[in-house]
Image (spheres, coloured by chain):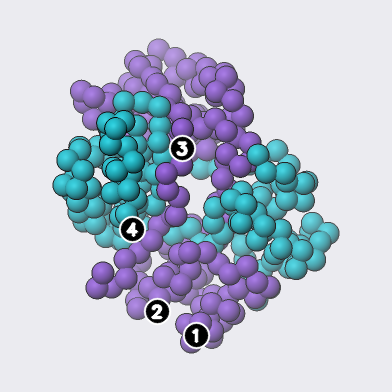
Chain colours: A cyan, B purple
Amino acid sequence: MSQLDDIDRALVNALQDDLPLTNRPFLPLAESLGITEDELLTRVKAMRESGVLTRFGPFFDAVRMGGAFCLCAMEVPQDRFDEVNDLVNAHLEVAHNYERSHKLNMWFVLGCDTKAGIQEAADKIEGETGLQVYQFPKLQEFFIGFRVAA
Amino acid sequence: MSIDATDRAIIEALQGGLPLVPQPYLEVAQSLNLEESELTDRLAVMKESGAIRRIAAAPNHYKLGMTANGMTVWDVDDAVLNEVGPKIGALPFVTHSYKRPRALPDWPYNLFAMVHGSSREEVEEKRQEIVAIIGDALRASDTLYSTRILKKTGLRLRKKGD
């Protein structure tokens, strides 16, 4: 686990809220934490480089752009796992992908700016791997949020 | 919302992330030959329409010590799913909770709730709170722990003509 101090932890939480659309968007946050804007940016860069933050920027919702997201799963034979993983990850539509402890052992999210793109990507993956792609689109969302103890 | 060519150029410029500089919107606007105000106005429209959920950080739970990532899945009586779903979604340790279609006969589960913890034991304890909420409407459940992140890039649009 990375060594984060209290200011880093407060930053992880604060940066999960919406950044304002102002000329100096980081400045009010830096002031509220009692650090300079430069120090804030240095800390965020360090957390990006160490992987504590995988990304910082706009979260686009493909659905609102006329597209779709879809959670998918596959049952991948252990001896083909790396090969299938390379085939799946090569698709731009695969936004993230996790190995999980289950018969269905590969879980990935397809994201596209067209609805048809999901089925096309799933069909391509099935064709390339010869394995079935189970599709679990979200029918309803009950909540989203995450906080670390600051 | 409908996206024009300028919006698309903005999305392509930002899908890898916002530059970590004091004036990030100005820098992006200059790279696209736009005024900063046009960029932020367009981003504001995308936020209003929901095309942008928020401009924020994506944390890596593993690196924050939340090393047990349990995707808990539940087969809940359809008649009560909409009643128990929001209660589960409101639990402080549940980060995402969705109704999803079953894939019978292999996959009977219609409710997914992501539970993060510092150990599998902790996830199991939290799971029991969900069991209590669902009560008699629970028919089956399972927990799928993530054992490896294989990819994590977020949404990427294909360039036109790709």
Residue B134 visible at all: yes
Instruction: Name which residue type carries label 3.
Output: Arg
Q: Residue at 48%, 58% (x, y): give it.
A: A59
C-alpha distance separating marks 4 and 2? 21 Å
Instruction: Name which residue type carries label 4.
Output: Leu
* Image quadrant where residue B37 sits: bottom right
**Residue B34 tag number:** 1
Which mark is in front, 4 or 3? 3
Q: Residue at 21%, 43% (x, y): give it.
A: A129
Work out whether A4 lies above or below B25.
above
**Callout 2 touching callout 1 (CB < 8 Å):** yes
Q: Which residue is mark 3?
A: B148
Instruction: Name which residue type carries label 2.
Output: Thr
Which mark is in front, 1 or 3? 3
Residue B92 locus on image (x, y percent): 59, 33
C-alpha distance separating marks 3 and 2? 37 Å
Which mark is in front, 4 or 2? 4
Circle 2 packing at 10 Å, graded few (<14), some (14-19), many (20+), is: few
The chain containing the residue under callout 3 comes to B
C-alpha distance separating marks 2 and 1? 9 Å
